[in-house]
Amino acid sequence: MAVIRPFQGVRPAKELASSIAALPYDVYDRKEAKKAVDFNPLSFLKIDRAETQFAADIDMYSQTVYDRAKDTLDEMRADGSFIQDDTDCYYIYALTMDGRTQTGLVGCASIDDYLENRIKKHENTREDKELDRTRHVDTLSAQTGPIFLAYHARPELTQIIDSVKLTAPLYDFTSEDSVRHQVWKISRTDYIQRIPLLFQEIDDIYIADGHHRAASAVKAGLKRREQHPGYTGNEEFNYFLSVLFPAEELKIYDYNRVVTDLNGYTFDEFLNLLRSGFEVTECGKSAYHPTCKGEIGLYGNGSWYCLRANPFLYSDDPVNSLDVSILQNVVLGPLLNIRDPKTDSRIRFIGGIRGIAALEEIVDDAGDGAAFAMYPTSMEELLRVADAGRLMPPKSTWFEPKLRSGLLIHLFEQ
């Protein structure tokens, strides 16, 4: 059973919500984050990426930066930019993109559920990235970026959410990327009492996106436990900010790969090597986007190709049967000697939201290498991997739309 608790949300003043709400901290590099804050001084990035408030030569991981983030949040609470609800509530967060809406319940998940794998993972995390967000969470005594979780829909919970959505929202705005964001507060006592009971009937929760944020929130909570040896388990630091969506509403986009060299092979030599595992069809100048599982689009030397994986490459294994695994195990590793894609500087990962043209541009600018356009991993594949207790290769899934940070904050110590 999963524990999902209500909390006293810290949230923007109504008229400031659209200006404060920001994409997750890790969507931006340092220059992009700085540019975004310069353009919009209210952007929550000035808290999530507080180095944007300093000169470019400051170490973005210095304690001074984390302290500045805390000071900024405190100042915005003091001046009324942020307010805090005075009772424990759940919230609803709906995002609409390209005519498709996904609606999540906002509450706080248990770090014990995470540690005991009732909250299931499908991706490894990197310690250096965990350390950054752990220090951020610990310094602020707050989780500022929600974890994107998924669950199998429950009719009664859906009915509660749908009924609340008939009322006036706290926020309703469309961001610069044409995504509509709507937030409602659930304050009815009977709903607040019923929702945690419904989640107790749900055995498994899945991390869809935000593995590093989740791991960091848990580590910060465990640190507070060490500092409070008499903790009861009810303290707020035992829980972390989450938005839970029915898995059936979610869409995964492709996560594509670009390699900057071909390990000493000419492109024609590389293409011939691929024929041992794939049926190779030349598509010319027309960009090729895979139309089904088992297809990979290849771009190099100014042309596109369709790679159709031979059936013998697939098995019943939930990880090895993923298209991203086939690419890694058959092409990137043995042919291009990219053994660890998490650390190898010769590979880049490009979210499908950027489009196929971005792959051409990167390869053409480099003058060498190749791009691989992937068919999206499905939610069914993700759940199957997580249920098996396995992990996907890095950058297997790209979720859109992205949750905005700054709309709801969970303080775990006042």
Image (spheres, rainbow, N blue to C red):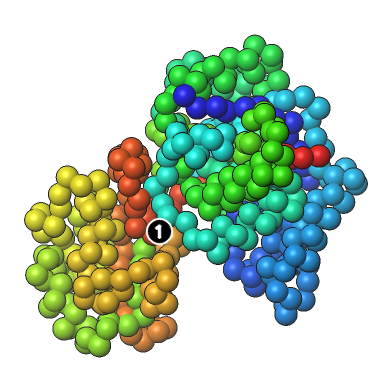
Residue 15: image quadrant is top right
**Residue closest to the eye, 318 or 271:** 318
Does residue 198 appear to the left or right of 219 in the view shown? left
The residue at which mark 1 appears reads as: 395
For the residue labelled by badge 1, is the local secondary structure a helix, a strand or a loop? Answer: loop
* Place of residue 317 in the rendered image (x, y in percent of width and height, measured from the top left): 20, 47
- Please identify the residue farthest to the front as the structure is shown: 229
* Place of residue 66 in the rendered image (x, y in percent of width and height, measured from the top left): 74, 60
Query: Does residue 198 show up?
Result: yes
Residue drawn at the location 44% of the way across and 60% of the way down? 351
Residue 254: image quadrant is bottom left
Residue drawn at the location 69% of the way across and 25% of the way down? 89
Up-down relation of residue 368 to residue 234 (above or below): below
Up-down relation of residue 201 to residue 220 (above or below): above
Residue drawn at the location 84% of the way across and 55% of the way down? 71
Residue 276: image quadrant is bottom left
Does residue 18 appear to the left or right of 331 in the view shown? right
Q: How many marks?
A: 1
Badge 1: residue crowd in 10 Å (few <14, some 14–19, many ≥20): some
Does residue 284 appear to the left or right of 360 in the view shown? left
Residue drawn at the location 45% of the way across and 44% of the way down? 208
The kind of residue on which mark 1 rests is: Lys
**Residue closest to the eye, 313 or 174:** 313
* Place of residue 69 in the rendered image (x, y in percent of width and height, measured from the top left): 77, 57
* Place of residue 53 in the rendered image (x, y in percent of width and height, measured from the top left): 78, 67
**Residue closest to the eye, 346 or 159:** 346
